[in-house]
Image (spheres, coloured by chain):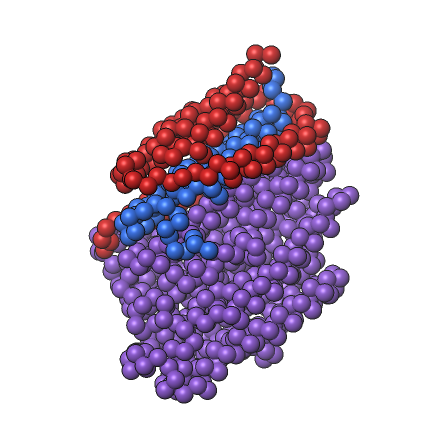
Amino acid sequence: MMEIPLSWYLSLSGVLFSIGVMGVLFRSNLIVILMSVELMLNAVNLTLVAFSQYLGDVSGQILVIFVMSVAAAEAAIGLALVIAIFRNKLTVDINNINLFKH
Amino acid sequence: MFAETLFLGASLIAIVASVGMLVSRSPVRSALWLILTLIVIAGLYLTLQADFIAVIQVLVYAGAIMVLFLFVIMLLNLGEMPDLERVDFKKGVGFVLGVAVLTLLTYIGTTAALDFPASSSDPATTGTATAIAKSLFTQYALPFEMIGILLLLATIGAVMLAKRTFE
Amino acid sequence: MSQDLSQAFDTIWADLAGGASMVGLAIVGVGLIVWDIFNSNDTRIPWVAAFALLGTAVLEMFRLNEADTTAFFELIRVGGVASFINVIILGSSLVSVVLSVPYLRQIRHAYGEVYALVLFATAGMLMLGTANNMVTVFVGLETMSIALYILTGLVRHDEGAVESALKYFLLGAFSTGFFLFGIALIYGSTGTMYFTDMAAGYAVGDFKALFWAGVGLFLVGFLFKVSAVPFHMWTPDVYQGAPTTLVGYMSTASKAAAFAALVLVLFHGIGLVTPEAGGGNLQLVLALSALVTVVLGNLMALAQKNVKRMLAYSSIAHAGYVLIGLAAGTSSAYAGALYYLLIYAIMNLGAFGVMALLEWDGREGRLQTLDSLSGLAHRHPLLGVLMGVFMFSLTGFPPFGGFFGKIAVFAPAVEAGLTWLAIVGVLASVLSAGYYLRVVYVFWMRPESEGDPAVRDTTFAVSRVSAGVLTVCAVLLLVIGFMPFVRNLTQSFFNSGVLVLLL
């Protein structure tokens, strides 16, 4: 039934994960960094669903549902912190935040 | 053949859109690119016959989480800030090469070993809402309840952190 | 595994007793939130939380001798080793809650929600520390982490606190990505989420490279949570910025939970995988990580002037000592690691507890330089004695618990052929005397006149309850080394563990 090889899905999710990692490392806008983390989690979800369907085992998709809930919670907390920072410093640029200057 | 073409087209869009998220100077554009990526990923779930996850992907990610992002961007009025960050493209080129190598390695490493013997059960049966719900409410009932606690505490935490004065 | 629904609900109902502490704490937490809505910041709320923690801790103590079994469709472990882990987590949470009551009032952040968040975080830790399945590991870990991000940013009007919460959050979310990718690859290559089925799944499948890549990514996520080098960058800033008693909480309870999960996954799952090549690599990776963690943690701690920051680097170094035990990988080493976690929890809670009592100026510890503490012991001899006990124990001097804990992890390492690592550990402990004893020296030997004059002239009261709890911790440290049954108990978990392997 599955016509597309599993390795294709894994490669795609590897690429998307790497793009997410790059976003976290290169961008200095806090909101874009949060979005990059979301992209990383999505890449993992793709891997999980692919494995789950090829193994014929549902627990991979269960984990995906939990990952989505956690992603929602993380987005809420992350954006709340961004708002708190913005209120203090009027910036969302990570280079203007003391603890990230090295 | 049709399935392969569909997959390749979808993954091309996903990669282009996520690179678009990476290099956009305006956060609103980044968010819109990311929404495109997420919707394409939902399409990929459909090619895997994971129907339920595909629907949830559109509802939760593209629908709820990204709206939250856009809402905060609008709230802070980031689009109109004078100093949009400069994205360093030179570093980017180096990393694109790195990603290319990584992908190649993943592909080589996996194709050899991994064309999974197709599982005995029909994938269409493990991707349905029935199959997932059955497992979620019996075998995984405990973590499911804990996720409820997690969402409650995230709500409280978001209020505590973001409210102007907290009592 | 689809099941008949009514039968499944019967199983869940029957297992509720096994998971009573986790479920109970979650329910009490929700209750406290509701209470706080109607009666905002009621002063009784923390005591209800403390009572719930005490009750569950006592319950788990009674279960220490029960057989180690699983509950909720084998998602978590109950009894035996799980109860021991739960006792460490619940005990540290209890001490932290009691110490937090006067401290949070002092810094004027005594919100009722804080205690509900602590209970939720503790429930997450119980799930993480006793997990037998990757799904429970993930859900427990995230419940704990998200609660800790919030608690770190509690003092919102203070820039440093929000920034350190943000740093913790960003790095934590980033590491979660790697951690999850690791879980996905392990799942794909073994076909199971259960620890106990992993070795069998690995043997059947043909995806060796994928499995080890997954283990590597999985370890990145864990090493981040226990703040091992090179994933420790967040620790000093977070520990300095967060409220002190809650730092004590996150440096003991969360670390114990994460390490316990790591012990269980190594003992029941990954550690059993005996590949043609690769098993040795895992030991080498853990050993190298332990080496750099111990060395770097101690060296950096030597250079610190702020006591809270020094204790942050010291907690990194102690994570390294536990990793030495995990690298050895024998059953006595795992037992030693759990024993070490217990003792570490007592002494680190004590050290942060004393520092919390010294924050009389309500400035969240930004003034806790060594100089400002000169001669404090003459004004508060009790605090001086307590700090002395905790510092000597953290160094590892013989009559105190820390010494016995270190023996418990170093001896199995020597037996497992990691003599070089044990020697580095011992040398690093000697080095650590340099900064721990400096605190004792400043407390007792330096005249008060050398301290900061602004600090010198303020008087401050020491909460009786806190002092009492800290004294109990200190006494425990003195006697625990002479209670061999505790050490034997940890050992028995892993001897009888053979039964579990056969299942």
Q: Colour of chain B?
A: red
Where residue C486 sits, quadrant-wise, is: bottom right
Query: Residue B93 placed where, x, y %?
Result: 54, 35
Q: Colour of chain C?
A: purple
Q: Residue furthest top?
A: B2
* C324, B119: nearer the viewer: C324
Q: Residue at x 54, y 53 (%)?
A: C231
Q: Residue furthest front?
A: B90
Left or right, residue C295 beside residue C143: right
Q: Quadrant of the C terminus of chain C?
A: top right
Q: Colour of chain A?
A: blue
Q: Residue at x 55, y 19 (%)?
A: B8
Q: Residue at x 55, y 76 (%)?
A: C434
Q: Residue furthest right?
A: C276
* B9, B57: nearer the viewer: B9
Query: Residue B13 placed where, x, y %?
Result: 48, 22
Query: Residue C428 placed where, x, y %?
Result: 62, 70
Q: Quadrant of the N terminus of chain C?
A: top right
Q: Is residue B144 visible?
A: no
Q: Residue at x 57, y 12 (%)?
A: B2
Q: Is residue B32 above or below residue C377?
A: above
Left or right, residue B74 beside residue A7: left
